[in-house]
Image (spheres, coloured by chain):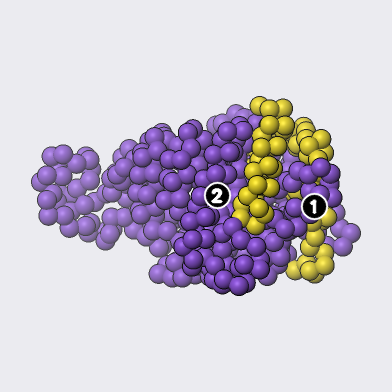
Amino acid sequence: MLPLEECTLDRVEKAKFAFFGNVDGVRKEMDALAENVNPEWFMWQGDQGLLPAAVVKNQIRTFGEKIIPRFK
Amino acid sequence: MKFLFFFLPTIPATLEERRKLRPIANRTEYFQKMIDEVVEMARLAEEVGFDAVAFPEHHLHGEGLEMGSLPLLTQHVIHNTRHIKVGPIGYVLPGWNPMRLAVEIGWLDQLTKGRTLIGFARGYQTRWLNNMAQKIHVSATVSDKSEVDRTNREAFEEVYHILKAAWGDEPFRYKGKHYEFPYPFETGTPWAPHEWTREFGAPGELDEKGNIRAINLIPKPYQKPHPPLFQAFSISEETVRWTARERITPSILISEPKRVRELAEIYRKESAEHGRRLNLGESIGVLRSLYIGENREQAMRMAEDGAIGVGLQILLSLRILGGLAVSRGRREISGPDAAIGGMHAGPR
């Protein structure tokens, strides 16, 4: 069992489970994933209910408009 | 690449509201707000180019996190969107009577004209699964190779095989440790109007005495032979090989790039050995969390308050991170125990 203090978002990011950044930064991580295995399905573990709906919607719209087209 | 938005239907509220209104999920006005938001998110995802929306199956969360997902929620979202696929990733199979689930999915796929997808999971949350699966004596598992884990896997595979058999065109018979169809298996199920069935029912459904000797599940899925299949959330090589053999798309939770590549190669090789030639990455899903901000710091702040931040804390309390998740100390993250997930991350 990991000590609580080791279970951080930094670790999640370092392990490449999560991508945190601006559009360019996230796109770069997506490029690396596509280059590595090019998965048929990218499954985004998203939000709803904890963050305000407007924030979540903005995330979905940004991803859809600025990142998805590159991989379609 | 196809895109799937996976989220945990959650009562929209701050932590302070959850504390003050506990258990917030008992409150209809909040529950309704959640249903509305789930539909709003699904509609937006569809509008901006996602191919699918999915939820995990969890129950009894009075705290208002991880609600659903039942076929009913899937149906509701499908009927409020236009073309995306919707479904759970996944149904926690040990918690379902397999015949009941096959019927529910058949109806769902027919009602929605083929817009559902199906995920499978083994279940890691004791609060609801131990109660729902009590009659077959199955408990939630953390994939630790224990007796509990072994029994859970046994029930999972039994339900899975029954589903596959039930969706076929021919009536099926099955005798396992937990279930048998027909029931009783040896003598068949008494059926008074057997002459009617003999004339109009499925060939092979009856024995010579007029007992039901095989089950002809109705309805069959709209999609043939069945809706697309996904496995939630794959971390072991054993699981990846199994999904390849069964033509299931694994949702890979492992995150270290070298290991992800290895698993993708294993999937492709195992598929080829079983008659399916695939390109690297074909038929594979990769689950990741992401937050987009003006910069990394802003994205991190959102993550702290969002599903991944709260999820990490809850995962810790569920005591499953040790098996799933982050490497310790300076050890590099690799191998089958090196993935990081959100709170839904039931390992297989």
> How far across and down, in percent of the image, does residue B71 sit?
43, 50
> Which residue occupies the foreground of this view, B52 or B120?
B52
Instruction: Quickly name the residue at label 2.
Output: B37
Residue B73 in the image: above or below residue A62? below
Q: Nearer the viewer, residue B314 or A16?
A: B314
Residue occupying image coordinates x 79% and y 54%? B301
| Residues packed near mark 1 inside 10 Å, few (<14), some (14 to 19) or many (20 plus) | many
Chain designation of label 1:
B
Decide: is B60 above or below B202.
Answer: below
Disc 1 residue type (three-letter): Met
Q: Residue B173 at what x, y percent from top left?
A: 32, 50
Residue B40 image position (x, y, % from top left): 55, 44
Whole-percent x, y for residue B290 in the image = 73, 46
Q: Quadrant of residue B65?
A: bottom right
Residue type, numbered disc 2: Glu
Residue found farthest to the right: B330
Element carrying mark 2: helix
Q: Earlier in the sequence, mark 1 or mark 2?
A: 2
Name the element at disc 1.
Answer: helix
Q: Tell me where residue B258 sits by quadrant.
A: top right
Supply the letter of whichever chain is purple: B
Residue at point 51% right, 50% down? B36
Would residue B333 be seen by someone viewing this image from the given angle?
no
Which residue is disc 1 drawn over? B300
Above or below residue B304? Residue B266 is above
Residue B142, by quadrant, is: bottom right
Q: Are marks 1 and 2 on the same chain?
A: yes
Q: Is residue B70 left or right of residue B239?
A: left
Q: What is chain A's hue in the picture?
A: yellow
Determine the CA span between mark 1 and mark 2: 23 Å
Question: What's the chain of the residue with tag 2?
Answer: B
Check the picture and name the quadrant holding the N terminus of chain A: bottom right
